[in-house]
Image (tube, rainbow, N blue to C red):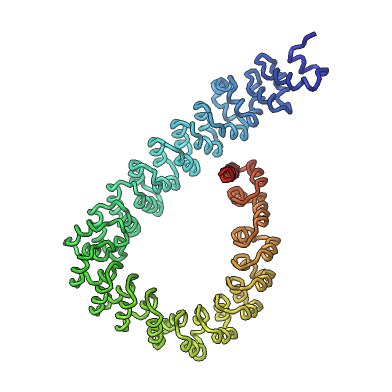
Amino acid sequence: MHQAPEEQSKDIATPPENLAATNLRTAENPNVEPELLRQLAVSDDTAVREAVAANPNTPTEVLLKLAETCPQQFLSNPVFSLLLLENPNFVADIPYYALINLLKQPELPDFFLVSAANHANPEILYLVAKHPNTSDRALEEMVRRNPKDTPLGLSIIKRENVSERVLSLLVEYSAIAVRLSLAKNPATSANILAKLAIVREANPNFQQEIYLKLAKNPHTPIQVIWGLLKKCDRKIKQTISQRADLPISIIVELAGDFQMHATNSLAENLAIGADVLMELANHPELRVRQMVVRHPNVPQSLLDKAVTIGELRQYVAENPSTPADLLVELVEDGEEEVLKAIATNPSATASVLESVAKTHSQDILIAQHPNATTKLLQQILWRLAMDERLSVRKYVAKHPQTPTEILIVWVRKRPELRLFIAQNPNISLEIIEQLAGDASAKVREALAYNPITPGYILEKFAKDAQIAVRQAVASNPKTSANILEFLAQDWQCSTFVAQNPNTPALVLEYLMRSSGFNWLLLAHPNTSLPMQHKLLCMLGTSGIESERIYAAKHPHTPVEMLMQLTSDRNLEIQDAALRTIEKRDRSFES
């Protein structure tokens, strides 16, 4: 006698090879009894469970259980939309992980997303905010209902083609971090930026941060920039002075401002062209003309003229575009401020610096200038060594070009200078050996940090009674592997050894067996790939979420660990692990 599929599935005499096909046909039958579908819902056969999830006759509670593993079939079930009509809170009844998987499906109906937008769980809301099919209506509802949810607001503004209506609501309702993100985003429209400028923040520090972001954003309208100028804040003005779209009216306003005049910020804006500077060359405001002649883009003809005008000479001397012959001419001026401007001018040549050096007034500035010749430096350092001021002698003691003869005398006769001599990166072996026996731990510490200190001295310092000296040896990038291996056993030095770029892999492996070095070892250039894998697996199984997130994002985390993290209870960690896997797949394909 012929049996129906439902009867075969219940009949214990049905052969196993026929049972799977029979169960599938039964699960697909829209007229099958709900009780039988309930039994088939726990089948080991994935195809059978998927068929049950798609069957309109399946009981609701069974559908909800299947939604997690069969999301596509659940969504395609004809009763899906009816369930939501019957029960407006139906989405809230869907189990958490099932709802998570449903919201990850690429095609979702608007009515479902609108209902999910009212969910109480923030993680659900973040997924709704990220879904490409989410309507403006749902986004607006979420913004109004969750005004202080910063991650939600940030998720919304990262969407493509967010409507101005939604963004306006974020400006009005969202937390400060969301408004800050909007203010600095170059993709934010001029209308939204203008609205951000008139929002009043309760915290004055946050208000200033909004203004600063708006001042820097290239799309902020000029009328808004004018409003920001009236805030009388130096940082805001300085930020505005660096914009590439400044009209002449704002340039004049900033040039005449005493704070901006002192900081020389307009002269650092290379977007101000020669044509604008020519137009402002004869401006009645002196500070505007001074800004013109100190700007690198000023035409040569204006510099030639300005060098004859007393109020402009210092500013010509500051200009890195001023040619050497004009600078030499300005040296003859003899004014302190003009000489100082020349000595700090990055374009001053060696011959120009020699001319300034003859005045004996800017020796320290010339000693710091990169264009000063060795001969000129030696001459100036001898002169500075005779200075009675301790601050000047300290500077000479640390200078790498200071003649050895000066330092040898000071080591013997000037104990207050030994600490600074020990920091000199060019001291002789004779001086190092004398300082190595100094009674002051500060002197020994400075010498232990010095990369020029030879290995046998560092080896001696590695056994120094003072912790700071041993730690300095552990930090010295020239310390040998043998010494670092010795210091790794000193718990007071091991952290410094873990950060030393010269520490070999074997010593790093020794440190890995202790706790507290994971982050340092992962960042170390000598950490091997297998060792990185071990460290990342330790972080990936940590009870601390920040460590699991780090492992989920790291490019070298083993695939097995990443797969495990895709099932983490934290949604952010799941997403990070999935993105890392996807990046690897793309890299492998290319």
Q: Is residue 393 left or right of residue 470?
A: left
Q: Position of residue 462 (x, y in %)?
A: 64, 76
Q: Is residue 374 above or below residue 282?
A: below
Q: Position of residue 393 (x, y in %)?
A: 43, 84
Locate the C terminus and report the quarter of the image it occupies: top right
Q: Nearer the viewer, residue 119 or 254?
A: 254
Residue occupying the point 27% across, 61% down: 297
Q: Is residue 101 left or right of residue 276?
A: right
Residue occupying the point 54% across, 39% down: 122
Is residue 61 visible from the viewing direction of this image? no
Q: How many marks?
A: 0
Residue lying at the far right of the rendered structure? 13
Q: Nearer the viewer, residue 270 or 387?
A: 270
Query: Where, by quadrant of the figure, is residue 392 drawn?
Result: bottom left
Is residue 331 visible from the viewing direction of this image? yes
Query: Where, by quadrant of the figure, is residue 560 drawn?
Result: top right
Q: Is residue 174 left or right of residue 556?
A: left
Residue lying at the far front of the rendered structure? 590
Residue occupying the point 50% across, 78% down: 425
